[in-house]
Amino acid sequence: MSRIKILVIDDEKLIGWSFKKEFSSEDFAVFTAETGEEGIELFQKDYHDIVFLDNKLPGIQGLEVLKKIKNLREDVFVIFMTAFGSIDTAVEAMKAGAYEYINKPFNFDEIRIILQGIQEKIDLVNEVNLLRREKPSDITFSHIIGNSPAMHKAIQLSKRIAQSEATTVLLLGESGTGKDVFAHAIHNESSRKKRPFVAINCATLPENLLESELFGHERGAFTGAHKLKKGLLEIAHGGTVFLNEIGEMPPNIQTKLLTVLEYKTFRRVGGTENIEVDVRIIAATNRDLEAAVKEGRFRLDLLYRLKVFQVKLPSLRERREDIPLLIDHFIRYLAKKFGKPIKGMTEESKKILQQYDWPGNVRELINVIERAIILENNEYIQKDSLPFELQELRPPANIKDVEMWLDIPDDGFSLYDLEKRIIELVLYKVNYNKTRAAKLMGITRDTLRYKMKKFNIS
């Protein structure tokens, strides 16, 4: 567990000893200093959440120590203590940033009440920091649309994982299949649902920034690190960290993540102390991680740790029976959003969308419906409101037409190899003109590009 750190700065050794005796537990770690100079030095070296500061100290006095500490880190909670109570001193301490003011002698029941209030505020601050990064969501598996066998299998497996004590989950699937939605649902249907959910895309940040965001950094760890910063792993303690596009994570950070998975500890950038953390890691990728391991771009031991529980999310073309459900759902939502009196989609338009391959999956479907709703002036979306390339799609060929030119052997054949060979032949026929090739095959250029990448056709 990540403990709250208390620093007691008081020249009376008994005070420091009493704090350690009363509060050193799994919730708090207590450190002591007998002078203001020693206290400032300790505070600079480590992340202390709370400081109990005596006013009368040998050397530099309490009020000056308070100002220096608040200058080093503004969010620290300082409780100002004095045996010589005066209104003026109290006012000055509060103006300098003290959280609370108490007179000596005090009893520890009073201190416990103060600590309880601060503990709640620390949790709240972590939540606020989280909400600034990631909008909270109430998504559960009941919000995921799909009755197809492939989607049903993915949902049921994810539900079992969510309710388990599994600390690593790997979501596999093409871009746009809803990996982020599944990650939210797994978190919100788990025992961690009341703790933070933090998401970060490993492909969008440079290595040094990604490392700092995940693990945090110490003050002075690098140029521009003027204050200590908690990382997302620390903020998400007790909750879930969603690492999207983990296949793009740099090797150095892969090594540090492996340490988190194996030992439940990490160090901030520039830090020397191990920080214990309890988080569930949900990683997602549209990459072939096995191939990345062979190419030396991804650690095999990290892959083994991540894939203990893995869920393959089906592409939209693998669950075409769900397309009508998705169409109806998105029309209701988007029509309300744009204030359009659209009730649905014509059967002709639905058939066009069902025969399309959707290389961008559900995300692409949403974009197509949104465009159609904006353009449509009728109650039902017409074919003319769909993108031109979808309107030009040909209907699937009749099986008898196929048998006229394809000799099907008795022992069967590989559909994968056949599709690849047909695409290669068509591209060769049109001198690799993608627009003409896509038109001949009755598909869009986007679908053709997707298939060329899938079959490694250059």
Image (cartoon, helix red, strand yellow):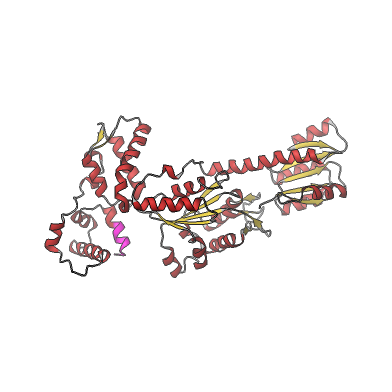
Q: Residue at x 73, y 37 (%)?
A: 99
Is residue 334 placed above or below 390 in the rendered structure? above
Q: Majority secondary structure of the magenta segment?
A: helix
Left or right: residue 106 compared with residue 67: right
The image shows residue 198 at horizontal and vertical percentages of 54, 48
Between 411 and 358, which is closer to the camera in this rendering? 411
Between 151 and 452, which is closer to the camera in this rendering? 151
Q: Is any atom of residue 67 visible in this view? A: yes
Q: Residue at x 78, y 44 (%)?
A: 52
Q: Is residue 225 magenta?
A: no
Q: Quadrant of residue 221?
A: bottom right
Q: Residue at x 22, y 67 (%)?
A: 412
Q: Is any atom of residue 11 visible in this view? A: no
Counting the numbered discs, the total is 0
Between 171 and 286, which is closer to the camera in this rendering? 171
Which portion, as a residue range, is magenta?
449-458
The image shows residue 458 at horizontal and vertical percentages of 29, 64
The image shows residue 452 at horizontal and vertical percentages of 29, 61
